[in-house]
Image (cartoon, grey):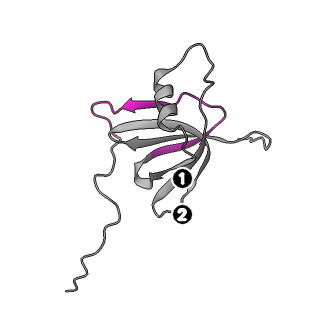
Amino acid sequence: MSKSSDKEKIFKIAFMNQGKVYELHARQVSQSGLFGFIEIGDFVFGESSAIVIDPSEEKLRSEFEGVVSTFVPMHSIVRIDEVEKRGNNKISDLADGAKVTQFPSPIYTPGTGKKD
């Protein structure tokens, strides 16, 4: 794999949110200072002046309008890829029989404080 140092990195991030899979493109992805979260920032959307407008991308653009960065729980992340160019941002429903599911409860639970 050859990487050019003058190209800016673009990441494709797929994560679960309220039973749907969000696919976003961003320039910044990092482990957050908030324990158990991934920080995503500097979102990349298509040109808003384009003749053909993708309604799915427009929904994401309006949902993340004014958001500097978002914090996604680590266990909601499906995949993070570094890509050569931006693809389509979209929200998808999980297909019936899908093999990807979100953890049903928090990974880290407080103890009861009782000792046996």
Residue 40 shown left or right of residue 85 in the figure: left
Mark 1 crowd level (few <14, some 14–19, many ≥20, 10 Å Cα): some
Residue pointed to by mark 2: 33
Q: Amino acid at mark 2?
A: Gly
Q: Which mark is residue 39?
A: 1
Q: Secondary structure at mark 1?
A: strand
| Quadrant showing the C terminus | bottom left
| Quadrant in the rendering for residue 19 | top left
Q: Residue at x 47, y 30 (%)?
A: 90
| Quadrant in the rendering for residue 97 | top left
Q: Which mark is residue 99?
A: none
86 in the magenta segment: yes
- Of all residues shown, which one is farthest toward the left? 116
Q: Amino acid at mark 1?
A: Glu
Segment tinted magenta in the rendering: 78-99
Q: Residue at x 62, y 31 (%)?
A: 86
The correct choice, above or below, for 23 with respect to 46 in the image is: below
Cα gap from disc 2 to disc 1, whole angstroms? 9 Å
Residue 1 shown left or right of residue 106 in the figure: right
Q: Are marks 2 and 1 in contact (CB under 8 Å)?
A: yes
Q: Residue at x 54, y 59 (%)?
A: 32
Mark 2 crowd level (few <14, some 14–19, many ≥20, 10 Å Cα): few
7 in the magenta segment: no
- Of all residues shown, which one is farthest toward the right? 6
Q: Residue at x 72, y 41 (%)?
A: 8
**Percent position (x, y) of residue 44?**
61, 35
**Percent position (x, y) of residue 95?**
32, 30
Among numbered discs 2 and 1, the one appearing first in the sequence: 2
The correct choice, above or below, for 84 with respect to 38 in the image is: above
| Quadrant showing the N terminus | top right
